[in-house]
Image (cartoon, rainbow, N blue to C red):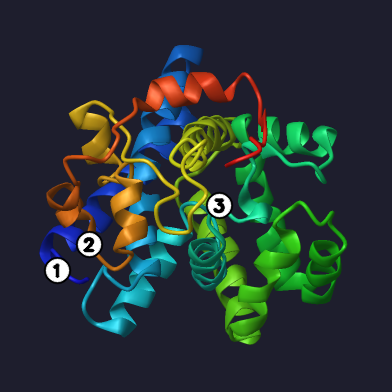
Amino acid sequence: MTDAIPTRLNLALVAGSTAGCGALLWGASHAVAAWQIALCALLFSFLNNTVFSLTHEAVHGVLHPDPTLNRWLGRWTAAFFPTGFGLQRALHLGHHRRNRSPVERFDYIGPDDSPVMKVVQWYGLLLGFFWVLSPITNAALALAPGLLERAANGLAAQTSGPAMMEGVEEADRRLLRWESAGMFLVQGLLFWALDGSWIGWAACYGAFALNWCSLQYADHAWSPLDVKEGAWNLRVSPPVQWLFLNYHLHLVHHRHPRLPWIHLPAHVRPEDPRPSFLAIYARMWLGPRRLPSRP
């Protein structure tokens, strides 16, 4: 299913959100009081989720109707995550193929799973470590792709590491390396141009990591174990839903991956459950559950 891409609105959002993120990085780097740094970091944590949502649109080819411009816009927005666009695309499209499969069933402890590994994965996700893996993975891809492959394949079977590498192996590895290297170049140029400070940068990206990770499994946790139906349309306040470009309507997205963000609300079914994001998120802190006998 495809509906019209809001091209002009998307371009305005790319320009405005990335400029705003740059301004907040500058503000956090030049603030003189701790509360000013904290305020910039808090605002950055939400606005950079707008940027990530635009990258997500580009991954599915619906940020701009021109494929070449769509990819370049995706490269630009991905650099604010930061990640390489091609790597993000390979991993995310793989997620759509593996959704709620055993390697992505983080919320349940199966009979063959290590409970310790599950708990480490779960709280690592909630505490932002999932985001930390992004720059590490991109650095390994840019500098030592063989090392990345060996590390992924050496992970335990219940992690998604080996499965994620399938998408990477299917892509143009040289292009992925250049895009990951280009992401670090963009970040370096931003840091130089904005006269950044390590404290300001760390505060903004630390807050973003926690905010971004809070949603990255809440939209799937304890949903049906089905590749398309295994997601939620979460209830959040209208300003948050708009800032995240309807990303919380994740069940609609999994049903129609190429549906532009602006059309997602129109495709929510009346019978779809609408759990509260805060309720799911609060339950997540209690840890993963045992897999029921009849999931």
Q: Is residue 56 left or right of residue 178?
A: left
The kind of residue on which mark 3 rests is Arg
Q: Mark 3 highlights which residue?
A: 100
Determine the CA span between mark 2 and mark 3.
Answer: 23 Å
Q: Which residue sits at x=55%, y=71%? A: 90
Q: Which residue sits at x=75%, y=37%? A: 118
**Which is more toward the observer, 206 or 246?**
246
- Which image quarter is the C terminus in? top right
Q: Is residue 54 visible?
A: no
Q: Is residue 161 left or right of residue 66?
A: right
Depicted 83 relative to depicted 173: above or below: above
Determine the CA span between mark 3 and mark 1.
Answer: 27 Å
Q: Which residue sits at x=20%, y=60%? A: 10
The image shows residue 60 at horizontal and vertical percentages of 36, 69
The kind of residue on which mark 1 rests is Asp
Sequence-wise first label, 2 or 1: 1
Secondary structure of the residue carrying tag 1 is: loop
Q: Is residue 3 visible?
A: yes
The image shows residue 49 at horizontal and vertical percentages of 38, 43
The image shows residue 6 at horizontal and vertical percentages of 13, 63
The kind of residue on which mark 2 rests is Pro
- Which image quarter is the N terminus in? bottom left
Asked if the residues shown at circle 2 and circle 1 are in contact, with their CB atoms under 8 angstroms apart, the answer is yes
Q: Mark 1 highlights which residue?
A: 3
Asked if the residues shown at circle 2 and circle 3 are in contact, with their CB atoms under 8 angstroms apart, the answer is no
Determine the CA span between mark 2 and mark 1.
Answer: 7 Å
Report crowding for label 1: few under 14, some 14 to 19, many 20 or more residues within 10 A (C-alpha). Answer: few
Q: Mark 2 highlights which residue?
A: 260
